Structures are given as C-alpha cells and as structure tokens.
Image (cartoon, grey):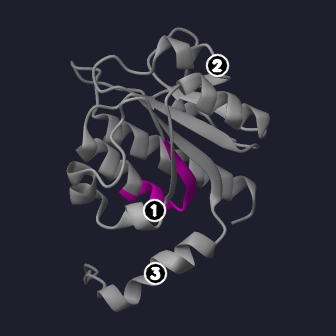
C-alpha cells in the first residue's frame, strides 16, 4: 500500500517571525556574493540564507543590495531577517572574515578544487564565496580562498545558475556542520 502524502499547513511549519530569527543561534556560515549582477539571484540567496539559518550575507561591489526591487521580489521578506553587509572590495570582506577565524571556500571550477560530494567534514566557521553569473568568482577572491568546492556535473553545459549552485553548497555545508556538531 502506498503512503499518502499531504502537504503541511503553514501553521505546521514551526515558522518564527523575523525578530525571533534575528535572535536565534545561526550556523557559522557567511555567504559572500562576489559581484553578482542579478537582483533576482541575490533575493534567492537571501531566502536561502533565511531558510537555512546562516549567519549573514555579504554583498560585494556592484552586487545589488536591499531594498532593490528584484531582490524584494524573490527574497519574500527575508531581507528583514537576514543580517547583511555591503563591501566595496572583496579583499576587505574576506580579510575581515579571516581575522575572525573564518575559513574561505570558493565555489568554482578550478584546478585543485575538491568535488563538494567528497567533502565529509566541516570543523570551522566558513565564508562561502559565490561569483558573478558570467565570470564566476573573481581572481582577487580566489587568491584569498583556503579551499575551492566544485559541484560534480554530468551534462553538456557544466554551468549552473549561481543561486542554485550556491543553495546546494549552503545545504551541504549546514548538513556537515550539524552532523559534526551533534545536531
């Protein structure tokens, strides 16, 4: 006999309001948006950051920032709950994070990367750098990375939307953090 699946009602989702979210403990992951062009992608990242309970989103350079119309369209209010900062320079952002003990991981297809599905442990706070929709993570950021994750792909394009690939990496990181910290 097949199990019947019934969608949960909104009241069953244990949602917290923005104020409670701001006060709850976050996972020590900062998402760094390195020169993204699309406010829609930025809004998607805000929404993912809220859903996954990560610490903050750093917007670099010309990356759109709230209250940009496209961000608000996809963020669905998460710009009110997620801590965010803007930096003119990627090096300023990453140097601040390094000084606070964060490991810097770039999400990029590079020589020397580690396929994300081979990463089995996270032990320290992390800054995850995702790059521009066309050119990827900047060379300036790559020089400051401690590691690079690559998503194993099997099709002809070997290219994914930045918000999709970033969401996959955020989920994987949170999963590993929870596994290693008894959550």
Give the CA separation, mark 1 to mark 3: 11 Å
**Is 50 contained in the magenta span?**
yes
Q: Secondary structure at mark 3?
A: loop
The percent position of residue 37, horizontal first and vertical second, equals 28, 31
Mark with earlier residue (1, 3)? 3
Callout 1 environment at 10 Å: few (<14), some (14 to 19), or many (20+)?
A: many
- Residue range of the region highlighted in magenta in the rendering: 47-58
Checking the image for residue 144, the label placed there is: 2
**Residues at circles 2 and 3 in contact by the CB criterion of under 8 Å:** no
Quadrant in which residue 21 is drawn: bottom right
Quickly name the residue at label 3: 17
Q: Nearer the viewer, residue 118 or 19?
A: 19
At a point 42% along the width and 44% down the height, the residue shown is 168
Asked if residue 51 is positioned above or below residue 135 in the image, the reply reads: below
Quadrant in which residue 147 is drawn: top right
At a point 28% along the width and 65% down the height, the residue shown is 76
At a point 28% along the width and 20% down the height, the residue shown is 134
């Amino acid at each position: 006999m097949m199990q019947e699946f019934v969608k949960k009602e909104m009241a069953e989702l244990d949602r917290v309001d923005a104020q409670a979210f701001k006060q709850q403990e976050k996972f020590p992951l900062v998402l760094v948006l390195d020169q993204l062009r699309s406010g829609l992608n930025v809004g998607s990242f805000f929404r993912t950051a809220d859903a996954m309970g990560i610490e903050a989103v750093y917007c670099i350079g010309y990356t759109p920032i709230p209250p940009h119309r496209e961000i608000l369209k996809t963020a669905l209010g998460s710009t009110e709950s997620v801590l965010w900062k803007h930096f003119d320079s990627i090096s300023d952002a990453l140097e601040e994070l390094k000084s606070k003990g964060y490991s810097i991981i770039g999400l990029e297809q590079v020589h020397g990367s580690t396929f994300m599905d081979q990463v089995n442990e996270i032990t320290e706070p992390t800054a995850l750098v995702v790059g521009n929709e066309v050119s990827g993570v900047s060379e300036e950021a790559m020089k400051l990375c401690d590691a690079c994750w690559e998503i194993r792909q099997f099709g002809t394009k070997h290219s994914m939307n930045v918000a999709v690939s970033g969401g996959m990496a955020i989920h994987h990181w949170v999963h590993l953090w929870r596994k290693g910290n008894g959550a």
